Amino acid sequence: MLTSPRGAPLVNVQMLIFFAVLLSYPLWASSAGLYQYLGVEIAIFVIYALGFNLLLGYTGLPSFGHGAFLGVGAYAYGLWQSAFPNVFAGLLIAIVCAGLSAGIVALFLSHRRGIYFALMTIAFGQIFWFLSIKLRWITGGEDGLLNILRPEIDFRFTSINLSSNVSLFYLVAILLIAVILILWRVVHSPFGTALQAIRMNETRARFAGHRVWLIKWSVFTLSGAIAGLAGGLLCITQESAYPDVMSLHASGFVVMMTLIGGGFVSFWGPVVGAIVFILARDVIGAWTETWLLWYGLLFMAVMIVEPEGVVGVWRRIEARLKGKTAGVAPVSAAKREAV
Amino acid sequence: MNAPQPYFYAENLHKRFGDQVVLENITLGFEQGKVNGIMGPNGAGKSTCFNLLTGMYKPDRGRIVFDGEDITGLSPEAIARKGVSRSFQIINLFDEFTALENIMVALPRVRTAMSRVLWDLRGDSALMDEARDILVQVGLKGRESTRAADLPYGQRRALEIGVALAARPRIVFLDEPTQGLGSDGRVNLADLINELKRNYTLVIIEHDMSFLFGLAHKISVIHWGQVISEGTPDELMQNEWVRASDLGKVA
């Protein structure tokens, strides 16, 4: 809560636990029945979902076309890599291109709210998806960009070959840690507080003198840039870039990840949601091809029983363990700070 | 010699929604350091007038001038940044924030620090003291940690005024501040306004005539979308229309 004169620490216990689990993943993955490539995928989608949650969970802006920026990042990385093979420059280009695309889209969105905002994100998402298929000479059309080889990164004193999934995992994990540390500061800054104020009452925020359209433009651009980073990493991982990630269908996944994890009530909601989503895909997918049907039912059940997602369930259990069994109030977004 | 212009004034404001004219040639002036009142029956156009003056709607015609600067057609945030603050008839708060957070988020040095990523509001005790002082001013001492949504109605009204004051305004517009308050709440609010008038220029729309007559220095009466009378409470009591209406019973 913001009432004690104590700021959020730069790093807290939850972060340290998460970082320890993350960085040790290659050591215990196989004994837990998991595999290295899965860890890379999860880490990438956690980055994507954390950036998306700035919009949905913090600002209350539902974007149903966010896959566009994941795709722009992937294509930008792939195209750059084909001409000038350099991983970090490629990732920077992915971030810049996705951020620019999001910034242009946000010019049209930042004065909108509610259903109008949501519909326009769908429309823009569809435009990007359509372009990715039709501009064959740039994007390779439905086949996508292929053969984007995972290069070796030369640090002079040592080198890392990204063709190893473990090496790639550590690259992604370090970037994920950087994203978490940066976003943690962002959400606790005046900007993060203003985002929450806009979610709660946009009109009041405007009359308090906040330039709401500029804040909405900025957060959309930032969120798009982070999606671009995730897209660039996805391109490295898959050694290709496909239009699928830009479809409306794929854009819906990040919404489901964020909601099922509890993005509205916790900074960690999208992290939990992305892990649950990718694991569900693999675990349920091992039983049946119709895994998405079962995941959809699971999503509906969670939303009906606990709209605040997995984090909400966890908090309810925690409260019960502490003996507060009677009348546990829904966790408010104001309590997000305690997480 | 021309008479000096009021601190805040509107000239010939005109507003129509579709084919309905809501305000027609409204001319109003508010004096600095005074409590200025606007009254009139339901549907007279008082709230629309407030919404024009504070930027929620743009007038079709006319101009609005604050401290010598034309603010006609500016956005609400631009007008707020020039020192015009307001409360709302229907309470408008950041419900999931605590009372203290509601104040903090409206402080000018927070809204102008959007790029300061390393500044955590919770870690700044001077900022929290500044916000706490405003809560004390509006009678909410001890409610710092209470979520706005959990405050009783009267305290939500007070917090609404607190959020308006947090923006460090030069003029404060209060839209029907007594709405929903019991008699004790009205007495407390009157005390608060008497305190505030020492430091702020206030403009109050009010339905409760006795409340407004007891506080305001000058009152404008709006009816049928026009200003039909203006003056001190005593002068208004001599007005034919006021005497003929329920307002006359106030005296």
Image (tube, coloured by chain):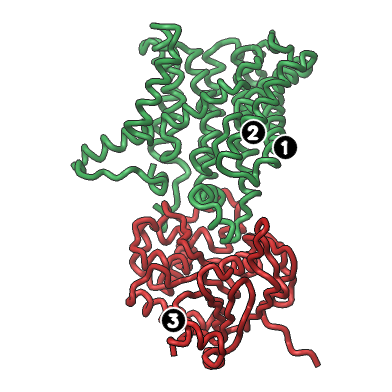
Q: Nearer the viewer, residue B42 or A233?
A: B42
Q: Amino acid at mark 2?
A: Ala
On the image, numbered disc 1 is attached to which residue?
Answer: A104
- Picture coordinates of residue B27 (x, y %)? 68, 77
Give how far apart the Cα atoms at labels 2 and 3 are.
54 Å
Q: Amino acid at mark 1?
A: Ile
Using the image, determine if residue B191 lies above or below residue B142.
below
Residue B211 numbered tag = 3
Question: Can marks 2 and 1 be said to lie on one chain?
Answer: yes
Chain shaded red: B
Q: Is residue A93 above or below residue B167?
A: above
For the residue pair A10 and B197, the one nearer the viewer reads as B197
Q: Please rate how many residues cluster around mark 1, counting C-alpha atoms within 10 Å: few if below 14, some from 14 to 19, many from 20.
A: some
Indicate the quadrant where residue B239 lies. Answer: bottom right
Q: Is residue A29 left or right of residue B74?
A: left
- Identify the residue shown where x is 34% and y is 33%: A306
Residue position marked by numbered label 2 in the rendering = A225
Which chain contains the residue that carries disc 3? B
Residue under the point 42% across and 54% down? B95
* Of marks 3 and 1, the one in the foreground: 3
The residue positioned 49% from the left and 56% from the top of the image is: B121
